[in-house]
Amino acid sequence: MELLDLIDPKSVVANLKVSSKKQALQELSARAAAVVGLPERRIFEALLERERLGTTGVGQGVAIPHGKFDELNGICGMFARLEVPIDFESIDDQPVDLIFLLLAPEGAGADHLKALARVSRLLRNQEICTKLRGADAPDALYAIITEPAESHAA
């Protein structure tokens, strides 16, 4: 599974201005609602519910919030680079500045897990994260995220 299948250029946000985890999730919910056609409130509530189970702040400044919805036909991703890092209650207690949101159909099962694993693999790569943190334009962020996996292996 390539990230090109999960995200498109209009789903990438550079320099998102938020000051809290809740505000970040609200802002991303609003933007995702415009892309997938689900109510913003439902997306936000699903993301909050997932966070109550345990933080999606995976460490090293990265968070991967996600939720499942009956109405979706496919997995949809959204990426945001925050203007200023925020507390996300991450597992390593480090502030987060890179967020990759994933929304999946309720029955996605293995595909949802593959998408999470693919995003996690990408964002565990420190070279990629450094490039993402240095890019200011959505198209540059999109290009870094969707670069074929083989080129990250070096």
Image (tube, grey):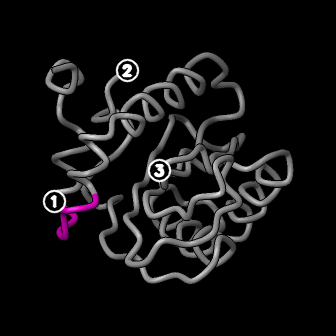
Nearest to N terminus: mark 3 or mark 1: 3
26 vs 28, left or right, is right
Front residue of 36/90: it is 90
Instruction: Name which residue lies at 68% across and 47% down.
Output: 91
Q: Distance of mark 3 from mark 1, alpha carbons?
A: 16 Å
Q: Quadrant of the N terminus?
A: top left
Residue 134 inside the magenta-drawn segment: yes
Q: What residue is pinned by disc 2?
A: 1
Label 1 environment density (alpha carbons within 10 Å; few <14, some 14–19, many ≥20): some
Residue 81 inside the magenta-drawn segment: no
Spot occupied by residue 45 in the image (x, y as percentages of width and height): 78, 63
Q: Amino acid at mark 3?
A: Phe
Residue 16, placed above or below residue 131: below
Nearest to N terminus: mark 3 or mark 2: 2
16 vs 63, left or right, is left
The nearer-to-camera label among 3 and 2 is 3
Front residue of 120/44: it is 120
Q: Which residues are magenta?
A: 133-138
Q: Distance of mark 3 from mark 2, alpha carbons?
A: 16 Å
Q: Amino acid at mark 2?
A: Met
32 vs 47, left or right, is left
Q: Say which element carries label 3.
A: strand
Label 2 environment density (alpha carbons within 10 Å; few <14, some 14–19, many ≥20): few
Q: What residue is pinned by disc 1?
A: 139
Q: Say which element carries label 2.
A: loop
Spot occupied by residue 26 in the image (x, y as percentages of width and height): 63, 74
Q: Amino acid at mark 1?
A: Asp
CB atoms of marks 3 and 2 within 8 Å: no
Nearest to N terminus: mark 2 or mark 1: 2
Q: What residue is pinned by disc 3?
A: 100
Instruction: Name which residue lies at 73% across and 50% down.
Output: 55
Spot occupied by residue 44 in the image (x, y as percentages of width and height): 70, 65
